Every structure is written in structure tokens, then in C-alpha cells.
């Protein structure tokens, strides 16, 4: 049984399985930090971090003024060559790295996050439009669900 407490203008609190031994109540930002710590990842939104991050999500424009979003590895950071088996780090391929739809972009963000040990730059406006916080919240729920399943398996062997 799950219990959720809604506060006025503050984000909802989450209580996880009160019938278990431990009770975890976390605020919205704590859940996001939990996910980032779990994957050893960091998210940056300030322009000064753009060139320093392993993975970048930023807006770009076509020659006739249409806004698109690019999501790719930083071509200037070569420390993660193991992820670049075909030598395409930092290169932009229209069919792989350019997005018009925020839903697809959010899925790519989560996919890259799950690889772990990554710094990610996400433009502030894109972060809001793609509802990255919501996807991080969903990822939190997935991680907790997997941990609970692992706990049950462990209890069965004791």
C-alpha cells in the first residue's frame, strides 16, 4: 500500500511501503538527487558548463529559423572513448541526434542517464519543456521498485 501526502504549493511527499521495516519520505528534489546519485550523474543548466559536460542537450536552429534540439556527446571530451565504438563522438547525425519532439528527447535523456558516470548539460528551457523532472521522478519509482524486488528475493533466501 502506498501513501501520498499532498502539501499546498509544495511538491508532494512520497512514503514508500509503510508496512516494511523502513519508511522513506522524500521531497521532490531529494528524489531527483537520489536518481542522480544512483547513476553517478550530474545535470548542469548553466551556459558556462556547456563545454565541460560529457553529454549535451541544447537548442539549435535551421537555416530558415526552425528550432530543433540536439542531444549528443561532447566532441571535446574524449575521456569516455569506451562509449564511442564507431568513432562518432560529438558528430551530429540528423537521424540520431536532432529532435523536434520533447518526448523522444526525454527518452534519450533517461537512456543516457542510465549509462551512469556522466555529466549532462541540459538547456534550461529544454529541461522545463521536456519535463525532465517528471522523467527523473518516474526513474526514482523504477529504482525503488527494483530495490524492493531485490529485497524480497534476498528475504526468500534467508
Image (cartoon, helix red, strand yellow):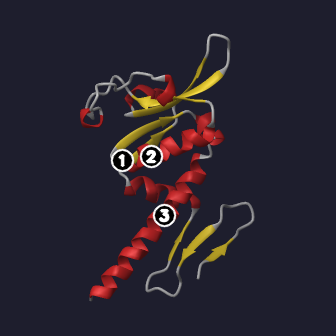
Decide if residue 149 is on the left or right side of residue 94. left
- Residue 42 horizontal/vertical position (percent): 42, 44
- Residue 129 horizontal/vertical position (percent): 65, 39
Res. 32 visible in picture: yes
Furthest residue in direction front, as rendered: 95
Q: Residue at x 55, y 58 (%)?
A: 137
- In 3D space, how far apart are the residues under numbered discs 3 and 2 (Cα atoms)? 13 Å
Disc count in the image? Answer: 3
- Figure quadrant of residue 13: bottom right
- Residue 44 horizontal/vertical position (percent): 47, 38
Quadrant the N terminus occupies: bottom right
**Of the pair 74 and 32, the residue shown nearer to us:** 74
Instruction: For mark 3, give the secondary structure.
Output: helix
**Of the pair 95 and 42, the residue shown nearer to us:** 95
**Of the pair 34 and 153, the residue shown nearer to us:** 153
Q: Compare marks 3 and 1 and give the one earlier in the sequence.
A: 1
Residue for badge 3: 142
Q: Is residue 4 above or below residue 116?
A: below
Residue for badge 1: 115
Residues at discs 1 and 2 in contact (Cβ within 8 Å): yes
Furthest residue in direction right, as rendered: 8
Res. 29 visible in picture: no
Q: Residue 111: which numbered mark, if any?
A: 2
Mark 1 crowd level (few <14, some 14–19, many ≥20, 10 Å Cα): few
Amino acid at each position: 500500500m502506498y501513501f501520498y501526502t499532498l502539501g499546498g504549493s509544495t511538491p508532494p511527499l512520497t512514503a514508500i511501503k509503510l508496512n516494511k521495516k523502513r519508511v522513506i519520505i522524500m521531497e521532490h528534489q531529494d528524489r531527483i538527487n537520489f536518481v542522480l546519485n544512483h547513476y553517478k550523474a550530474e545535470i548542469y543548466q548553466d551556459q558556462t558548463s556547456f563545454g565541460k559536460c560529457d553529454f549535451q542537450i541544447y537548442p539549435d536552429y535551421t537555416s530558415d529559423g526552425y528550432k530543433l534540439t540536439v542531444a549528443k556527446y561532447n566532441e571535446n571530451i574524449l575521456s569516455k572513448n569506451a562509449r564511442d565504438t564507431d568513432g562518432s563522438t560529438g558528430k551530429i547525425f540528423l537521424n540520431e541526434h536532432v529532435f523536434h519532439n520533447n518526448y523522444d528527447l526525454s527518452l534519450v535523456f533517461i537512456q543516457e542517464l542510465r549509462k551512469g558516470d556522466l555529466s549532462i548539460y541540459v538547456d534550461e528551457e529544454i529541461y522545463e519543456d521536456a519535463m525532465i523532472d517528471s522523467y527523473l521522478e518516474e526513474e526514482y519509482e523504477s529504482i525503488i521498485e527494483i530495490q524492493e524486488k531485490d529485497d524480497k528475493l534476498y528475504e526468500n533466501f534467508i
